[in-house]
Amino acid sequence: MVKINYYATLNVSPQATYAEIKQAYRILVKQYHPDSNSSQGDHDAIVRINAAYEVLSDPQKRKQYDAKRQAKRKATASQQRARQQNRRQRTSASQHTQATAGQDIDMQLHQWLQQVYKPVNRLLNHILTTLDNQVDELAADPFDDALMEEFQEYIEQCRSCWRQAQQEFRSMPNPSPVAKAAAHLYYCINQIGDGIEELEWFTLNYDESYLHAGQEMFRRASYLRWEAQMAVRDIF
């Protein structure tokens, strides 16, 4: 993801024209170059300014840079939504605990296992165990339209399974004894959702950083799914 704000380095807005970028670059170079201003000469500043200008003055590099900035903002927004959902989940779990205080806990656990855990686990397994094969097939020629179309169809299938898993997970409140397992499933589902978004970005611009990010999120999701399995095993 983008770490340095090149627009801030050159003191221009993200909507700046090439002429504005070029003018800002010249002003800063004159200000910090030791040959033109010995009192304010700063080699490190010149390095940063040149790096920013190299990207922002090239239309293709600037387009890729802007895409990464947008992806970072999107990821930040996704994390914020995840935190909000987590707070709602905890609130819902607390309310559910109070509402079901007198019910038969064994029946609740059985219902949760059959109606939530098993179908969700099956859907997540289908998503997580198919990515490597899909990537291997696409690796033959990522720029082949037919292969890319098949990969996009695979992403849509994953998204469909992911949405179904979300619905199944929310189909009934989580009994308090399965709170740990439910939390692992919840974060697993979130990781998969974020991973799908990264894979989608890869199909739009062929930037492998998104593909690698998606694969890493799927790996984290696989570990969370395993944690959920261990937690369920401890209960049942």
Image (cartoon, grey):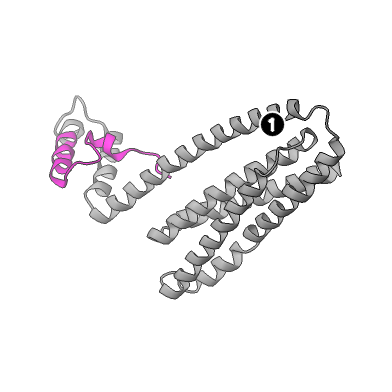
Q: Secondary structure at mark 1?
A: helix
Tell me what residue is drawn at x 80 percent, y 35 percent.
177
Q: Quadrant of residue 157?
A: bottom right
Whether residue 217 sits left or right of residue 125 in the image: it is left
| Image point (55%, 49%), residue name | 193
Image position of 160 (left or right of 204): right
- Is any part of residue 220 visible from this angle? no
Give x and y (percent) for residue 82.
55, 37
- The amino acid marked with disc number 1 is Ala
- What is the quadrant of the C terminus in the image? top right
Above or below residue 74? Residue 28 is above
Residue 116 in percent (x, y) is at: 72, 48
| Coordinates of residue 153 in the picture (x, y in percent) | 50, 66
Any magenta on residue 22? yes
Residue to which mark 1 is pinned: 93
* Region in magenta: 1-29
Relative height, residue 98 to residue 233 (above, below)? above
